């Protein structure tokens, strides 16, 4: 996880990454971006490959 950052008058989180886990296994990340004041975040779902 990278810390979530808010800046000044921007009402959105502008950067940071949240790692989502279930039973100590990462299933997704939520990336709030590069510091731009916008309402865009990217969720990346981890795909578990069977052996």
Image (spheres, rainbow, N blue to C red):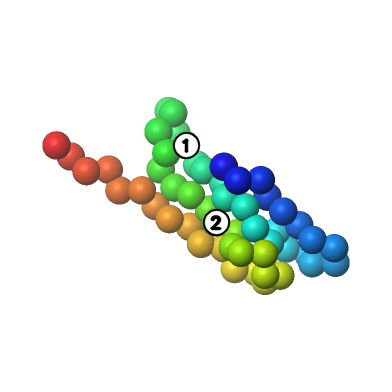
Dot 1 surroundings within 10 Å: few (below 14), some, or many (20 or more)?
few
Task: Kindly identify the residue that appears in the image at 61 percent across and 64 percent down.
Answer: 34
Q: Nearer the viewer, residue 50 or 1?
A: 1
**Quadrant the N terminus occupies:** top right
Instruction: Say what secondary structure mark 1 lies in.
Output: strand
Q: How many marks?
A: 2
User: Quarter of the image holding residue 22?
Assistant: top left
Dot 2 surroundings within 10 Å: few (below 14), some, or many (20 or more)?
many
Instruction: Say what secondary structure mark 2 lies in.
Output: strand
Residue receiving disc 2: 31
Q: From the top left corner, tell me how far across and down residue 41 is, in percent.
A: 57, 63
15 vs 26, left or right, is: right
Image: 17 above or below 40: above
Instruction: Indicate which disc residue 5 carries.
Output: none
Tell which residue pokes out farthest to the left in this image: 51
Q: From the top left corner, tell me how far across and down residue 32 is, in percent.
A: 60, 59
Q: From the top left corner, tell me how far across and down residue 23 is, in percent.
A: 43, 28
Task: Kindly identify the residue that appears in the image at 59 percent across and 68 percent down.
Answer: 40
47 vs 25, left or right, is: left
Image: 50 above or below 5: above
Task: Kindly identify the residue that appears in the image at 51 percent across and 62 percent down.
Answer: 42
8 vs 29, left or right, is: right
Q: CA distance from mark 1 to mark 2?
A: 15 Å
21 vs 11, left or right, is: left
Instruction: Indicate which disc residue 21 carries.
Output: 1
**Quadrant the C terminus occupies:** top left
Task: Kindly identify the residue that appears in the image at 56 percent across and 46 percent down.
Answer: 18
Q: Nearer the viewer, residue 13 or 36?
A: 36
Q: From the top left corner, tell me how far across and down residue 24 is, in percent.
A: 44, 28
Mark 1 or mark 2: whose residue is earlier in sequence: 1
Image: 40 above or below 44: below
Q: Of discs 1 and 2, which sits in the foreground?
A: 2
């Amino acid at each position: 996880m990278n810390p979530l950052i808010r800046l000044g008058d921007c009402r959105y989180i502008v950067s940071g990454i949240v790692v989502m886990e279930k039973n100590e296994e990462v299933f997704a990340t939520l990336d709030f971006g590069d510091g731009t004041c916008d309402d865009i975040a990217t969720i990346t779902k981890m795909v578990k490959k069977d052996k």
